[in-house]
Amino acid sequence: MKITPDPYVPPTNQPQKINESDPVKQSKAQDNTENKTAAATHQQKILSWFSRVGISPSMSSPDPQREKQALARRKQILELQKASNLKAVLNIALNVSITESDGDNVDPDWFFAFSSLAEEIYSPAMQELWGKIFAVEISRPGSFSLRSLQLLKSLTHRDAKVFAKAVSIASRRNNDKVPRILVGFHRRKGLFSFLRRPVPEQINLASVGLSYPDLLALQDMKLIYASEIESGEYTEGQQSSWRCGNENLQLESKTTGVALVYYKFTAVGSELYKLVSRHENQAYTKLLKSVLSEAFIIK
């Protein structure tokens, strides 16, 4: 018997191949891979942070004994982390060189309040600040109030960077411990003041690195007062001395009725000011002298 082939052969389902030369399909495949990688990295970061406080997805267990052990382990991790934080603050304090000493002892209540707050400081940059605080307090007890410590505890590293911007443009009058951010002057309007050419009387602080949102943040943190303050009016020839960055400025009023305008640091801000490394903002100093020269002779 002769078998003849069936003239009709049904089509077989062949797997479709991606045309490797198709850039659209290649791009979609690449995007899918990148999205999966990004999602995995994102999840890994979440797991990493929660592991630092002893929490993991596998903690929940129907076995009460295992769950109890997991909770005990979490408590141990937290206590070890707090001890590690205090150790970091201690090491920084030991390496701060301060020769001046009053001879008084640190208040025990202050110390234990300090340690309770410092053990919850996890950022290395903020630990450095707390180490400096303790070194200064040991040398000069009473330098930092508990109120300052409580405020400092609420600050983040980002907040500290904003405060450092303010410190870099702060000035202090001779024999005055309270820093101020000089922004310009105010001139009392006289009968013929409209004849004078208009001059800028204030600095735009945003142009030298301290934006308006930064100012609002500093005010919310109670580090500077919420509004500009004017000094008393100067008489003609009256002088005042200021330390601005690395420069000493001697101001002599050209006329009567001129007042300096500034933002003043609060008591807490003044305490923390002593801890921040100051980096001179030359752009600010140059602009300040330019503005003040309209009303003062600068020596």
Image (cartoon, rainbow, N blue to C red):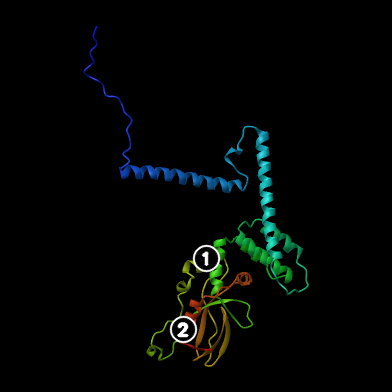
Question: Where in the figure is residue 14, as x and y percent of width and height?
Answer: 31, 28
Query: What residue is at 63 percent from the left and 78 percent from the top?
Result: 177
Percent from the top left, x then y, of residue 35? 43, 45
Q: Is residue 30 left or right of residue 299?
A: left
Q: Amino acid at mark 2?
A: Ser
Per the image, the residue denoted by label 2 is 290
Q: Nearer the viewer, residue 52 or 91?
A: 91
Can residue 116 be seen by looking at this rendering? no
- SS of the residue under disc 1: helix
Whether residue 199 appears in this view of the structure is yes
Left or right relative to 260: residue 3: left
Q: Is residue 102 left or right of residue 47?
A: right
**Real-space Cα distance between discs 2 and 1?**
28 Å
Which residue is at the front of the view, 203 or 279? 279
Crowd class of label 2 (few under 14; some 14 to 19; many from 20; radius 10 Å): some
Q: Which mark is residue 217?
A: 1
- For the point 50% across and 46% down, which residue is it? 41
Q: Nearer the N terminus, badge 2 or badge 1? A: 1
Q: Residues within 10 Å of mark 1 (few under 14, many from 20)?
A: some
Quadrant of the drawing holding the N terminus: top left
Secondary-structure class at tag 2: helix
